[in-house]
Amino acid sequence: MPFISRDPVTKVIIRATTREVPGTEFVPHSHPELMAFMQARGVDLKQVDEALSELRRTDMDMSRAVEDVITALLRKNILKMGDLPKAVQDRIALRVKMRVQIAEAYDRATSSGRPI
């Protein structure tokens, strides 16, 4: 997510941003030069690490929320499956298939009539 700009002569980092803009390069959050740049400017790297950890921790929940929004938009015909990129269509189709398999398994177990 971080993009950096370097001084054209010295090649040291002169700017860091979360958005790609012309002339920037992507580096990982743990890039030693980026960490030194941030620390030299009084940024608490622990705070950044904690925010990144929280984003990673909530990725699955957010993924499900986005899936639910897309499903609602499709059901209301606000969005058509063909409007989505092919890769997204394939992912959604696979997830729908997996959810159907899970629901069917629960239904079979429930309708078997055998007590536990």
Image: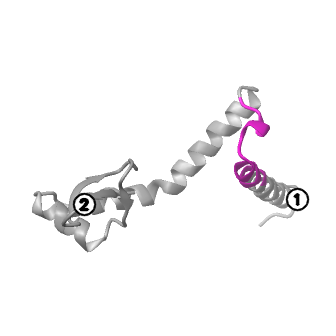
What's the residue type where badge 1 is placed?
Answer: Gly
Mark 2 and mark 1 lie on one chain; the one further toward the N terminus is 2
- Whether residue 42 is in magenta: the answer is no
Image point 84% across, 56% down: which residue?
104
* Image quadrant occupied by the N terminus: bottom left
Q: Quadrant of residue 81?
A: top right
SS category of the residue bearing label 2: loop
Kindly state the secondary structure of the residue where label 1 is placed. loop
**Left or right: where does residue 41 sit relative to residue 64?**
left
Residue segment shown in magenta: 79-93
Q: Position of residue 50 (x, y in %)?
A: 29, 60
* Residue matched to label 1: 113
Q: Residue furthest right?
A: 112
In the image, 99 versus 10, the foreground residue is: 10
Residue projecting furthest to the front: 9
Residue that numbered label 2 is attached to: 8
Residue 29 x, y percent position in the rendering: 33, 65
Whether residue 26 sits left or right of residue 11 in the image: it is right
User: Residue at the location (71% across, 41% down)?
Assistant: 84
Q: Quadrant of the C terminus?
A: bottom right
